[in-house]
Image (cartoon, rainbow, N blue to C red):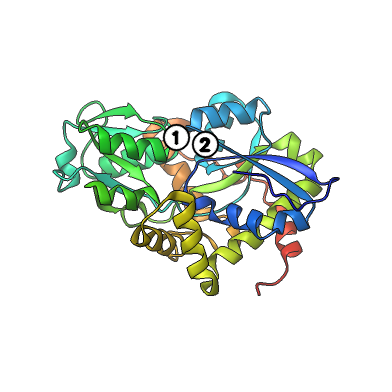
């Protein structure tokens, strides 16, 4: 994705690492509409192939800001000893439990393979929790195979008949339907509130660059507002269609999923504390961490910059 060209020569350059999915529509809009440029920011977007690469890149300083499932930030703290903090929300994931055509129920996944990105974080844990709720346990009833981020994972599910199920979000949850896969239900319907995508950074970087971070978050909030504004629906559908090479129906379905209350984009990129409680509870249960009791939420959060940025963005038009 190109940098925004209209920022002035003395603007601050930020490297932002993302998964190439539709949840980044606010970022795309904020760049296209000049919200970053007006706040003297030049955004360089990097696409990550998987969460392992993203976590390693943030730890090594290859970029300043990551947007992904915030459970990855928890994993960085707990498994890698990295002092990262979550600085805003984004969405509730919009994932569907997608399966091959011959699978008609979750219990049909017995003896099958679940496609995941990284086995111990985010949507993989959510999928394992859903299967556990239906009596299926990893290694006893089904296996797990690494298949990369959502784009590569969805392609692998279409190509490999051994991959019976996987958590897939828009637009890929719609494009794989066109290739024969189907949904057994949304993550939201199967698990309830969930804090999925958010932004996280190194704590020391946030402390040293508070003004830059706040300008970034303010522009991102403006992009989120623009993307969710019903007046911009047709423009957003066209943008999604062009960006992801979607059919008209897939683009419309993707946009509708993005703006669905509760399961889609959060107004103003707000952070869901109940949703994050679900994230930590699933990690405690499925990974056996913290003695099975999730820790206090705030140790992973610094929403002070977001609070200032929301004031900078002003009232909702």
Query: Label 1: how many residues lie within 10 Å, few (<14), some (14-19) or many (20+)?
Result: many
Q: At 36% from the left edge and 30% from the top edge, which residue is drawn?
A: 147
Is residue 68 found left or right of 118 in the rendered image? right
In front of the other: 166 or 48 = 48
Residue picked out by circle 1:
121
In primary-sequence order, the first of circles 2 and 1 is: 2
* Dots 2, 1 in contact, CB < 8 A: yes
Quadrant the C terminus occupies: bottom right
Looking at this rendering, what residue extends furthest in the right direction? 10
Find residue 40 and name its label.
none
Above or below, 53 against 172 in this view is: above
Horizontal and vertical percent position of residue 86? 62, 44
Residue picked out by circle 2:
72
Is residue 43 found left or right of 208 in the rendered image? left
Q: At 32% from the left edge and 57% from the top edge, which residue is drawn?
A: 189
Horizontal and vertical percent position of residue 31? 65, 54
Residue 304 visible in the picture? no
Horizontal and vertical percent position of residue 161? 20, 33
Kindly indicate the quadrant of the structure image that contains residue 100: top left
Kindly indicate the quadrant of the structure image that contains residue 152: top left
In front of the other: 147 or 303 = 147
Q: At 63% from the left edge and 27% from the top edge, which residue is drawn?
A: 59
Horizontal and vertical percent position of residue 260? 43, 65
Distance CA(mark 2)–CA(mark 1)? 6 Å
């Amino acid at each position: 994705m190109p940098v925004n060209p209209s920022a002035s020569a003395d603007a601050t350059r930020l490297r932002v690492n993302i998964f190439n999915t539709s949840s980044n529509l606010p970022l795309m809009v904020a760049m296209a509409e000049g919200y970053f440029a007006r706040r003297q920011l030049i955004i360089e977007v990097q696409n990550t192939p998987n969460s392992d690469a993203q976590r390693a890149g943030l730890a090594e300083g290859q970029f300043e800001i990551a947007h992904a499932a915030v459970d990855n930030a928890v994993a960085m703290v707990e498994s890698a000893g990295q002092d990262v903090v979550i600085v805003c929300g984004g969405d509730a994931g919009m994932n569907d439990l997608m399966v091959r055509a011959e699978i008609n129920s979750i219990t049909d996944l017995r003896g099958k393979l679940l496609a995941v990105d990284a086995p111990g974080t985010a949507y993989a844990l959510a999928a394992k929790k859903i299967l556990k709720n239906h009596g299926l346990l990893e290694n006893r009833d089904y296996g797990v195979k690494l298949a990369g981020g959502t784009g590569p994972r969805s392609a692998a599910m279409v190509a490999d008949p051994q991959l019976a199920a996987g958590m897939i979000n828009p637009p890929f949850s719609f494009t794989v339907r066109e290739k024969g896969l189907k949904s057994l239900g949304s993550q939201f319907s199967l698990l309830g509130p969930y804090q999925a995508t958010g932004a996280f950074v190194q704590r020391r970087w946030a402390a040293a660059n508070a003004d830059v971070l706040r300008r970034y978050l303010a522009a991102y909030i403006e992009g989120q507002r623009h993307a969710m504004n019903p007046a911009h629906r047709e423009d957003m559908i066209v943008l999604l269609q062009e960006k992801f090479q979607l059919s008209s129906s897939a683009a419309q379905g993707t946009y509708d999923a993005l703006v669905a209350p509760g399961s889609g984009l959060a107004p103003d990129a707000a952070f869901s504390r109940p949703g994050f409680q679900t994230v930590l509870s699933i990690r405690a249960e499925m990974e056996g961490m913290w003695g099975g009791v999730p820790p206090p939420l705030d140790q992973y959060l610094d929403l002070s910059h977001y609070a200032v940025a929301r004031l900078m963005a002003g009232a909702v038009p």
